Structure formats: C-alpha cells, structure tokens
Image (spheres, rainbow, N blue to C red):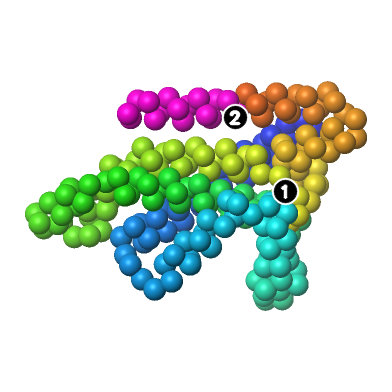
C-alpha cells in the first residue's frame, strides 16, 4: 500500500526525534556548562555522523547492533532481541544521523542565553536545576525548536544507513526514501512520483515553518 511507507516514516521520525531531543538537550547542556578532559574528542564523535557517508554510518551500526555485533550479540543471547531488519533499527539509524543537528541547535541556543539571567536567579536562591528549567530552557526554546524541525526532517529523509541496518521490507521497514528508490528501480514511476511529491511538499512545509519561526523570533 502507498500509505504504509508514509505512516512508517512518520512513526520512525517522530520517535527518533523525541529521543534525539532528550539526548541532544542533555549533551548540549553538559558541553556548554562544564569543562572536562576529552571534551573536544567526544564532541567530534557526536558530530561525526553529519559528515560520514551514510553507508559508513550504516555499516558501523551493523557492527554494533547486528546479531553478531558488540551490542546486538548481548541483546540476542540474553533477551532474544534482534534489532536489525526491524523498524527499530531504522529508528536508531535516524537518531544517529539527526543527533548532530539537534546537538548543534541546542548548543547554540544555550550559548546565546545570557549568563546574567542564570546568575541573577541563583543569587535569588534558585538552585541549578530550577535555573535550567525556569530560565535557561525557556530562553533557549527557539533554538531547540529549530533543532526539532531539522532533526525530524533529517530522520524523514534518511536512506543509506536505514537500508544497511533495516533493509527494504514492505510494511515493516520500507520508509518513503526506500520506497521511492525501489519503485523507480522497478519502473513503477506512478508510485515513485506520488511519494516524491508527498516528500517534497512535506519537506517544503517543514522548511517554510522553520524559516517563519526564525523570523518571528528575530
């Protein structure tokens, strides 16, 4: 069915973006607030998927979460869980490739929050946790929102790493990019054109919404 890859893509994108939001905010807060040994090295590792070829990211994930992988082997022998060639593998791939966008957006947002506000709140007796939730996070919401939009769009368009770890199983792991590729390869231009149109319209709406949000906040 034409709607199956659309529904699956939205499901994967929403879930991966939710996870990316939590991880991205946490990492951005740690890296902007604290200084520690190996900080630059760890930050480079976080941003690496943004510049690596998708096939490299996908193969790296196979090494980690495959049935014989470092993590996948433990999950399989201990709990009987297999991640690869399942929609959860596609979700993990989307999370990995979109995390750098979320992290960079959140980091920039936190750096733009004036320390004067935080220091003033702490002088008035607020603890660090309350300052973060009541002062820092609300002031950084515009940048965080931009990270959410960019991460969701990146997850929705993920192809290479997803193909490596999840495959192209109609109704189970076939997302919009995969469906377009294999429909075009098999000569089904009607399906490919329709999915392409849906993807373009949705992506246009996402970018338009992001630009509108930036202008309003500006």
Whether 106 is among the magenta residues is no
Relative to residue 121, is residue 2 drawn left or right?
Answer: right
Out of 13 and 218, give the one closest to the viewer: 218
Q: Position of residue 151 (x, y in %)?
A: 53, 43
Q: Residue at x 83, y 23 (%)?
A: 190
Whether 214 is among the magenta residues is yes
Q: Quadrant of the N terminus?
A: top right
Q: Secondary structure beneath disc 1?
A: helix
The quadrant where residue 142 appears:
top left
Q: Where does label 1 land, which residue?
A: 160
Q: Position of residue 47 (x, y in %)?
A: 52, 56
Relative to residue 45, is residue 74 drawn left or right?
Answer: right
Bounds of the magenta span? 202-218
Disc 2 crowd, CA 10 A, few/some/many (<14, 14-19, 20+):
some
Q: Position of residue 101 (x, y in %)?
A: 50, 47
Q: CA distance from mark 1 to mark 2?
A: 18 Å
Q: Secondary structure beneath disc 2?
A: helix
In the image, farthest residue toward the right: 186
Q: Decide: marks 1, 2 in contact (CB < 8 A)?
A: no
């Amino acid at each position: 069915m034409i709607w199956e890859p659309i529904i699956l893509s939205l499901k994967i994108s929403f879930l991966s973006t939710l996870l990316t939001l939590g991880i991205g905010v946490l990492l951005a807060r740690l890296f902007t607030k604290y200084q520690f040994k190996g900080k630059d090295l760890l930050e480079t590792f976080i941003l690496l998927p943004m510049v690596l070829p998708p096939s490299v990211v996908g193969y790296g994930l196979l090494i980690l979460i495959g049935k014989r992988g470092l993590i996948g082997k433990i999950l399989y022998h201990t709990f009987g869980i297999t991640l690869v060639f399942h929609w959860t593998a596609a979700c993990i791939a989307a999370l990995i490739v979109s995390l750098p966008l979320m992290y960079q957006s959140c980091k920039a947002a936190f750096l733009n929050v004036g320390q004067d506000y935080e220091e003033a709140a702490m002088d008035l007796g607020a603890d660090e946790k309350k300052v973060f939730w009541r002062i820092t996070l609300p002031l950084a919401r515009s940048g965080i929102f931009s990270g959410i939009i960019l991460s969701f769009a990146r997850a929705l368009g993920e192809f290479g790493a997803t193909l490596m770890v999840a495959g192209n199983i109609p109704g189970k792991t076939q997302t919009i990019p995969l469906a377009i590729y294999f429909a075009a390869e098999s000569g089904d231009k009607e399906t490919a054109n329709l999915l392409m149109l849906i993807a373009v319209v949705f992506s246009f709406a996402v970018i338009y919404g992001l630009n509108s949000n930036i202008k309003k906040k500006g």
